[in-house]
Image (cartoon, rainbow, N blue to C red):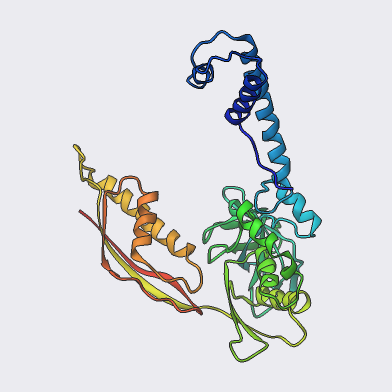
């Protein structure tokens, strides 16, 4: 059945036409025009029709919500989740950020010392990470590197480099730091992302299908980015450029892909992206149309924020995504309200980034006019 929502104006007009035909309201040929033009006619019956039309319009609104709730193209929120429950494809939840930790003990080691996984480390602002591997110290090595995962899901659990410095367990005189920022930590799928996933739920359940990979990686804790290159070495082979690329993360991904996603005959090759450094030299103006120009200390503060936002922009780029100066300019304009004008000395043109490459910022030079 084709359902079509009706609105107040349409419903009211139909009621008036019926009442006019049934001689329940004035036969004056101008009467309907008076009503359409919202002139005061002081007709109690017409006012009742208006009230009923408004009530029916509200009923139509509720019917429309129910009608759309079962259709993947229109459903929102919990209605989408209900559709996902029917086809056994839940909405991807927020993922946890992932980081590598460097531990050091100042205790004299006479024999091998092992600390089980699950050790908590903290940042100064209270964020915590839990180790995924045991810590092992030997007489020849008082340091070790292990992987850890955020206890707080989503973007809120991310940390920058050298933020994790406190250890829950004070034994062995442990010191800790994270030399690099955490990776991953997403806030889950919004309705549009989830809608696209649901439209491909049949493919998700077919091993070796592209959407089976998409579904797996959308739920993977710690993932920064990935790029699939099918048939890279002939039929049945797939190259996955992935970040991060430490041994613990790679083993986890490889084993789970083999057991849950791949067909028996598929040959997977996991590799880190080739890093491509891009220097950025820009001229910025923050004083255009200002009666009182910024002083040097204020400009230094703005420069520092621009520097941070350039780093943030590069961190947002995907594997294989070209660097486009215009997009960086838009990013800076959106995040630095004081900026009036931005000009690139280098690069002036887009920089091509190959499918297996990931660009990162090299030297940054910011000239403030």
Where on the picture, by quarter, is residue 246? Answer: bottom right
Q: Is residue 133 visible?
A: no
The percent coordinates of residue 194 (x first, y second) are 66, 56
Instruction: Judge from the rendering whether residue 260 lies leftward or rightward of residue 269; answer left or right.
Output: right
The percent coordinates of residue 236 (x first, y second) are 68, 88
The residue depicted at 75 percent of the width and 76 percent of the height is 207
Q: Nearer the viewer, residue 197 or 287?
A: 197
Where on the picture, by quarter, is residue 350? Answer: bottom left
The percent coordinates of residue 79 (x first, y second) are 72, 46
Q: Nearer the viewer, residue 193 or 343?
A: 193
The percent coordinates of residue 19 (x first, y second) are 65, 20
Q: Is residue 322 visible?
A: yes
Against 28, is 127 above or below?
below
The residue depicted at 28 percent of the width and 45 percent of the height is 298
Instruction: Judge from the rendering whether residue 161 lies leftward or rightward of residue 151; answer left or right.
Output: left
The residue depicted at 36 percent of the width and 74 percent of the height is 351
């Amino acid at each position: 059945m084709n359902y079509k929502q009706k609105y107040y104006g349409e419903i009211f007009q139909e009621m008036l036409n019926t009442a006019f035909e049934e001689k329940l309201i004035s036969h004056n040929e101008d009467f309907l025009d008076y009503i359409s033009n919202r002139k005061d006619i002081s007709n109690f019956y017409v006012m009742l029709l208006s009230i009923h039309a408004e009530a029916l319009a509200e009923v139509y609104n509720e019917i429309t919500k129910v009608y759309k709730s079962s259709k993947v193209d229109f459903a929102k929120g919990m209605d989408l989740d209900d559709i996902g429950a029917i086809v056994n494809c839940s909405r991807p939840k927020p993922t946890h950020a992932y980081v590598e930790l460097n531990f050091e003990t100042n205790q004299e080691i006479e024999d091998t010392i092992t600390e089980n996984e699950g050790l908590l480390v903290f940042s100064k602002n209270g964020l915590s990470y839990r180790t995924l591997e045991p810590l092992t110290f030997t007489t020849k090595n008082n340091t070790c590197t292990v992987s850890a995962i955020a206890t707080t899901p989503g973007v809120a659990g991310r940390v920058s480099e050298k933020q994790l410095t406190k250890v829950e367990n004070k034994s062995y005189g442990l010191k800790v730091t994270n030399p690099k920022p955490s990776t991953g930590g997403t806030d889950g799928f919004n309705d549009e992302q989830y809608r696209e996933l649901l439209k491909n739920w049949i493919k998700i359940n077919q091993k070796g299908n592209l959407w089976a990979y998409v579904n797996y990686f959308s739920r993977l804790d710690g993932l920064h980015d990935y790029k699939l290159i099918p048939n890279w070495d002939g039929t049945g082979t797939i190259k996955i450029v992935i970040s991060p690329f430490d041994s613990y993360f790679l083993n986890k991904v490889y084993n789970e892909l083999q057991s849950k996603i791949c067909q028996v005959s598929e040959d997977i090759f996991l590799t880190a992206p080739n890093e491509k450094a891009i220097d950025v030299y820009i001229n910025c103006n923050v004083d255009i149309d200002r009666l009182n120009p910024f002083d040097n200390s204020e400009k230094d503060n703005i420069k520092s924020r621009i520097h941070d936002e350039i780093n943030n922009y590069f961190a947002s780029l995907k594997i294989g995504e070209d660097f486009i100066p215009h997009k960086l300019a838009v990013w800076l304009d959106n995040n630095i309200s004081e900026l009036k004008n931005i000009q690139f000395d280098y690069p002036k043109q887009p920089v091509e980034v190959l499918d297996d490459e990931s660009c990162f910022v090299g030297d940054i030079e910011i000239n403030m006019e």
